């Protein structure tokens, strides 16, 4: 796990993906590409394609679940 703490924008993304859904960038209107790129680089999320609707987006990784839980435990 990347031990870096998440910021509020990253937590919003992790909150939106924590149930295992694949969501596109439009699901996070106040989050920019720089945040998504940083989270992919940290290994917290990965690019994915929804097999049902064939839409491109992101999904949370096991490391992302750990960071999300740590943020939740810290009251974020």
Image: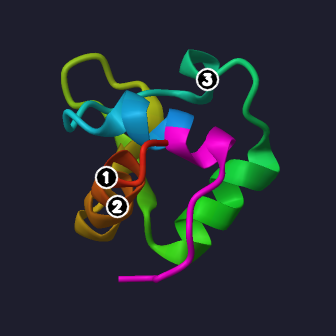
Q: Which residue is drawn at 79% across and 38% down?
A: 32
Q: In which quarter of the image is the N terminus?
A: bottom left
The label shown at residue 28 is 3
Compare residues 65 and 8 and report the one nearer the observer. Answer: 8
Between label 1 and label 3, give the one nearer the viewer: 1
Question: Does 59 lie within the magenta span?
Answer: no
Q: Is residue 53 left or right of residue 46?
A: left
Q: In this view, does 42 lie above or below 68?
A: below
Q: Does the magenta stretch include residue 8?
A: yes
Residue highlighted by disc 1:
73
Kindly report the distance in space between the C-alpha atoms of the residues bearing marks 2 and 3.
21 Å
Q: Do the residues labelled 2 and 1 touch (CB within 8 Å)?
A: yes
Q: Is residue 68 left or right of residue 29?
A: left
- Residue 24 location, x and y as percent? 51, 27
Q: Is mark 1 on a helix, strand or loop?
A: helix
Residue, disc 2: 70
Please report the residue visible at 31 percent of the width from the left and 70 percent of the height from the top: 63
**Quadrant in which residue 44 is drawn:** bottom left
Q: Distance between the residues labelled 1 and 3?
A: 23 Å
Q: Where is residue 42 in the image (x, y as percent from the top left)?
A: 54, 75
| 3D distance between C-alphas at marks 2 and 1 | 5 Å
Q: Earlier in the sequence, mark 1 or mark 3?
A: 3
Which numbered tag is attached to residue 57?
none
Relative side of 30 to 11, left or right: right
**Do tag 2 and tag 3 residues touch (Cβ < 8 Å)?**
no
Give residue 39's position: percent from left, percent from top.
58, 61
Residues shaded magenta: 1-11
């Amino acid at each position: 796990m990347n031990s870096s703490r998440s910021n509020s924008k990253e937590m919003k993304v992790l909150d939106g993906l924590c149930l295992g859904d694949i969501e596109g960038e439009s699901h996070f209107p106040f989050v920019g590409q720089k945040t998504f790129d940083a989270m992919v680089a940290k290994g917290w999320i990965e690019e994915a394609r929804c097999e049902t609707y064939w839409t491109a987006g992101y999904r949370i990784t096991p490391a992302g679940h750990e960071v999300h839980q740590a943020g939740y435990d810290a009251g974020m």
